[in-house]
Image: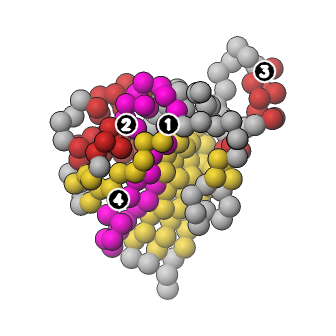
Amino acid sequence: MTYRIRRSALGSSILLLAACQAQYPECDTFEFGDLETEPRVEDPDASFDDCGSVRAAGMMEMPVVEDQSALDCALANIADGRATRLEIAWSPDAEYSEQATLWSDDAGLTMRWRSMTNDLNLDREARLFQLDRERVNACRDLADAGARFTCLYDAFDAADIVETCATKMRYSE
């Protein structure tokens, strides 16, 4: 079952009224709480191909990637237009670390929740991006898993932000 990240009842009514127009989904499909934990999908009919988790370490220019099969699963699903979910842990034990979860629909619209830690500072954000599926597809052709990982991050940097769902910053003193 393909799943579009969208408003549930009100969003569906709006989409029915504007059936001929392409509408960007919004953030109401997710419950964000206080952003201390991964958001929860509110729609009981939501179905994602869970690719699992990928762990990367080192600098973004050439990270070392463990369990590249999870990364390859997500790249293939996003490029081929299958709803997918992927968890990312980048240098979880380093001074700068990042945790992220991606939910992508059949058109490359992807919600990324991420938590970034630098020293004792913590930034969390949840944003919807319109990924370029062709760009993500090109990532699949790279021979090195670290290059594929960096390519996926670059696809987010190049993507349009559809909406910022929530952000939270905490600084140490």
Query: Quadrant of the image for the N terminus?
Result: top right
Residue at (27, 40) in percent of width and height = 148
Residue 99: say if magenta. yes
Q: Real-space Cα distance between discs 2 and 1? A: 9 Å
The amino acid marked with disc number 1 is Asp
**Element marked by disc 2:** helix
Residue 57 coordinates in the image, percent (x, y): 26, 60
Q: Are marks 3 and 2 in contact (CB under 8 Å)?
A: no
Residue that numbered label 2 is attached to? 73
Observer able to see residue 22:
yes
Q: Which one is closest to the eye, mark 1 or mark 3?
A: 1
Observer able to see residue 154:
no
Left or right: 151 in relation to 106:
left
**Element marked by disc 4:** strand
Instruction: Report the span colored magenta.
Output: 74-100
Query: Of label 4 and label 1, which has the lower sequence position?
Result: 1
Q: Are marks 4 and 1 in contact (CB under 8 Å)?
A: no
Residue at (67, 26) in percent of width and height = 23
Q: Real-space Cα distance between discs 4 and 1? A: 21 Å
Residue at (33, 56) in percent of width and height = 55
The amino acid marked with disc number 3 is Leu
Left or right: 133 in relation to 44:
left
Residue 6 coordinates in the image, percent (x, y): 68, 35
Residue that numbered label 3 is attached to? 16
